[in-house]
Image: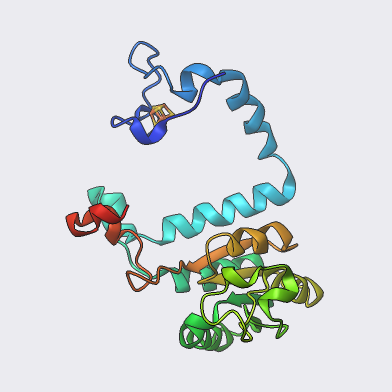
Amino acid sequence: MYNPQCAKCYQKYCYQGIMDESKLPSFCPLRNSKELIQKVKQNYQNEKTQNFYLLSSLIEKEAYDEKAAREEGKSIPVRPRIREIVEFGKKLGSTKIGVAFCIGVSDEAARASSILENHGFEVCSVACSCGGLDKSELGVPPHYKIKDPRKYESACNPLLQAELLNQSQTDFNVLLGLCVGHDMLFTMNSEAPVTTLLVKDRFTGHNPVISLYTRYHRHLV
Ligand code: SF4
């Protein structure tokens, strides 16, 4: 048993197509998981997986300027993620898209929903506070509340968000800003595939990678 540690591999030999075992690091899956690599390769033959995978690959290709990529080997991005979600939905033949959002990003959810609608999709959106339950009703002890423990504090309800979108039979769901953990619960309970448009980071204005770059956040991480 070993733990893959690709994040610590600076050469990324797999990306370069270099399979020379003498060069691969000790934690490399190419060295340690040869059988698994072949076994998983077969899983792509599943019709649904293959369809999803081909569409994903096309979305990836179309993310770059084709001429610059083919003729100059340059990777020049040409469109934002919201547009990629739109194009993926169209290619998939989706008609109904779910939006599960945090009330803290309500404005962004409204904008995303109207963009999806402008592209012809039917959109079902559910706020995290949907259900109108106090946190105590979902087993949260008073001292876990953010503000006055004696007062109503709206519970995030990712299971209800998932169930409402399951009942609406959305083709896939888009996450906007659910809390860490609530997003996992949503994903665990969503019947439709889930993609993320916006990752909530209260501290950085939803740009969590800033904390990976700036020295001024080093004491925080
Ligand atoms: S699979 Fe191997 S070569 Fe590729 S990034 Fe991981 S450790 Fe590096």
Q: Position of residue 115 (x, y in %)?
A: 51, 85
In this picture, is 166 found above or below 62?
below
Observer-nearest residue: 75 or 200? 200
In this picture, is 102 found above or below 64?
below
Q: Residue furthest right?
A: 167
Tell me: 179 left or right of 22.
right
Q: Residue furthest left?
A: 215
Residue 67: quadrant of the picture = bottom left
Q: Position of residue 108 (x, y in %)?
A: 46, 83
Task: Please count the marks in the image.
Answer: 0
Observer-nearest residue: 135 or 29? 135
Q: Position of residue 64 (x, y in %)?
A: 35, 59
- Residue 184 appears anywhere in the view: yes
Observer-nearest residue: 23 or 7? 7
Residue 39: quadrant of the picture = top right
Q: Position of residue 172 (x, y in %)?
A: 66, 67
Q: Residue at x 53, y 89 (%)?
A: 114
Q: Residue at x 47, y 22 (%)?
A: 30
The colour mode here is rainbow
From the image, which quarter does the N terminus lie in? top right
Q: Residue at x 43, y 68 (%)?
A: 81
Observer-nearest residue: 6 or 153? 153
Q: Quadrant of ligand 1?
A: top left
- Residue 160 appears anywhere in the view: no
Q: Residue at x 54, y 82 (%)?
A: 148
